[in-house]
């Protein structure tokens, strides 16, 4: 069958692979199929609210990564995309028995694979791990073994080969883009997981250097997005936890940027607009979004404004970097300028512990 003749639903799934809820049947039918229950409504655009039904998770346990000399293990759970952050933190502390972090490092960047200069990769990896080990931090990533997450995974792998100290690295990924996810279905199970990526697949394998995974499910297949709100709300909730009750101090949260597309600039702006604002560290020289923000930071005044010549350079760089027209580049430029209004919270220093607290 050619790809042109395959009928796909808006959720990304092939239509004939949907599991419909049969009138009068219990949700057990769909639950036993190991899929989100899908309500088949012909000639209507698919939506999460109308065409999926929440049910108790059937996917949690321990995965054992295959394909390496040493078998890495990670705890995992598949959850609804709109799960409450307090329930998620309760799971992490009570069931996974994690201690509350004293620092939360949220890593964002490019999803597609990209190379880093060896020295920059070393500085990034060493600084990230040093910050995590010395402060008892949690590292939060997108969980799959591509792009920025692959570089985080390399740093974690290098650390684990030299030290017994375990770094808590939590991947929050959309269930619908995970390769070999069917192997993980089961309640309180230990399952082998093949972490070798398939170059012919549009799905992605989970990174085998992470210690925990939260897999957000909104019923879509092959699409990102299910994890975005869950991750943002969970990070916010964790940051509000009091680690020093006498001082009323919450968990410091920092946003770490490596490379990245236009959406990463949006993430930076959202972080800076949080109440309280989240400090941002950009890895200068890593490419694309990071370098655009770094350039603006270097040449902007204390009030965040830039000269006309710097503006022109930024617009040209944005156009070339993202293959945008002038109008699209102007929108990104305005976002960058909004970020610069809080430039004191943006650091482009080498990734060192001091930079985590601008």
Image: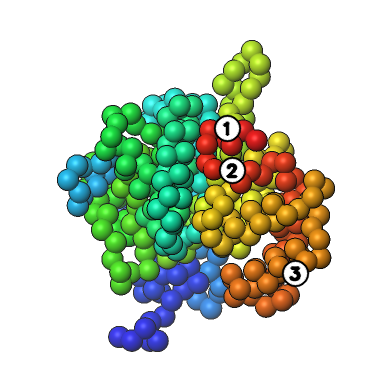
Q: Quadrant of residue 356?
A: top right
Q: How is the image coloured?
A: rainbow
Marks 1/2 in contact by CB < 8 Å: the verdict is yes
Residue placed under numbered mark 3 in the picture: 312
Position of the N terminus, as image quadrant, is: bottom left
Measured in 3D between alpha carbons, the distance from the residue under mark 3 to the one under mark 2, in whole angstroms, is: 25 Å
In the rendered image, residue 52, in percent from the top left (x then y), is placed at 48, 59
Q: Say whether residue 58 is visible.
A: no
Label 1 neighbour load within 10 Å: few <14, some 14-19, many 20+: few
Marks 3/2 in contact by CB < 8 Å: the verdict is no
Q: Is residue 173 left or right of residue 205?
A: right
Residue placed under numbered mark 1 in the picture: 354
Q: Which one is earlier in the sequence, the residue at label 1 or at label 2?
A: 2
Q: Which one is earlier in the sequence, the residue at label 3 or at label 2?
A: 3
Q: Say whether residue 201 is visible.
A: yes
Label 3 neighbour load within 10 Å: few <14, some 14-19, many 20+: few
Marks 3/1 in contact by CB < 8 Å: the verdict is no
Residue placed under numbered mark 2 in the picture: 349
Q: Residue at x 31, y 47 (%)?
A: 208
In the rendered image, residue 342, in percent from the top left (x then y), is placed at 75, 45
Viewer-nearest residue: 334 or 233: 334
Q: Residue at x 21, y 42 (%)?
A: 71
Q: Is residue 194 left or right of residue 93?
A: left
């Amino acid at each position: 069958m050619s790809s042109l003749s395959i009928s796909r639903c808006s959720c990304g799934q092939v239509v004939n692979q949907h599991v419909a809820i049969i009138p009068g049947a219990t949700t057990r039918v769909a639950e036993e199929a190991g899929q989100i229950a899908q309500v088949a409504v012909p000639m209507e655009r698919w939506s999460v609210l109308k065409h999926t039904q929440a049910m108790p998770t059937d996917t949690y346990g321990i995965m054992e990564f295959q394909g390496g000399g040493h078998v890495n293990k990670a705890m995992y759970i598949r959850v609804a995309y709109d799960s409450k952050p307090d329930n998620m933190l309760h799971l992490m502390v009570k069931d996974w028995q994690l201690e509350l972090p004293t620092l939360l490092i949220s890593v964002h960047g490019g999803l597609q694979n990209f190379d880093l200069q060896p020295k920059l990769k070393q500085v990034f990896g060493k600084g990230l791990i040093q910050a995590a080990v010395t402060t008892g931090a949690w590292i939060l990533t997108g969980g799959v073994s591509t792009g920025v997450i692959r570089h985080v995974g390399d740093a974690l792998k290098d650390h684990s080969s030299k030290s017994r100290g375990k770094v808590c690295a939590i991947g929050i990924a959309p269930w619908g883009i995970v390769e070999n996810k069917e192997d993980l279905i089961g309640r309180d199970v230990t399952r082998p997981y093949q972490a070798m990526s398939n170059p012919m697949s549009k799905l992605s394998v989970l990174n085998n250097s992470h210690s925990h995974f939260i897999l957000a499910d909104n019923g879509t297949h092959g699409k990102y997005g299910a994890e975005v709100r869950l991750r943002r709300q969970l990070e916010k909730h964790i940051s509000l936890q009091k680690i020093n009750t006498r001082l009323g101090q919450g968990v410091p949260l920092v946003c770490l940027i490596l490379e990245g597309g236009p959406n990463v600039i949006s993430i930076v702006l959202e972080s800076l607009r949080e109440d309280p604002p989240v400090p941002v560290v950009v890895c200068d020289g890593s490419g694309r979004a990071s370098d655009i923000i770094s350039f603006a930071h270097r040449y902007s005044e204390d009030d965040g404004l830039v000269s006309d010549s710097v503006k022109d350079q930024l617009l040209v760089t944005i156009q070339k970097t993202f293959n945008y027209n002038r109008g699209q580049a102007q929108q990104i430029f305005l976002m960058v300028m909004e970020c610069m209004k809080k430039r004191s919270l943006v650091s482009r220093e080498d990734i060192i512990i001091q930079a985590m607290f601008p």
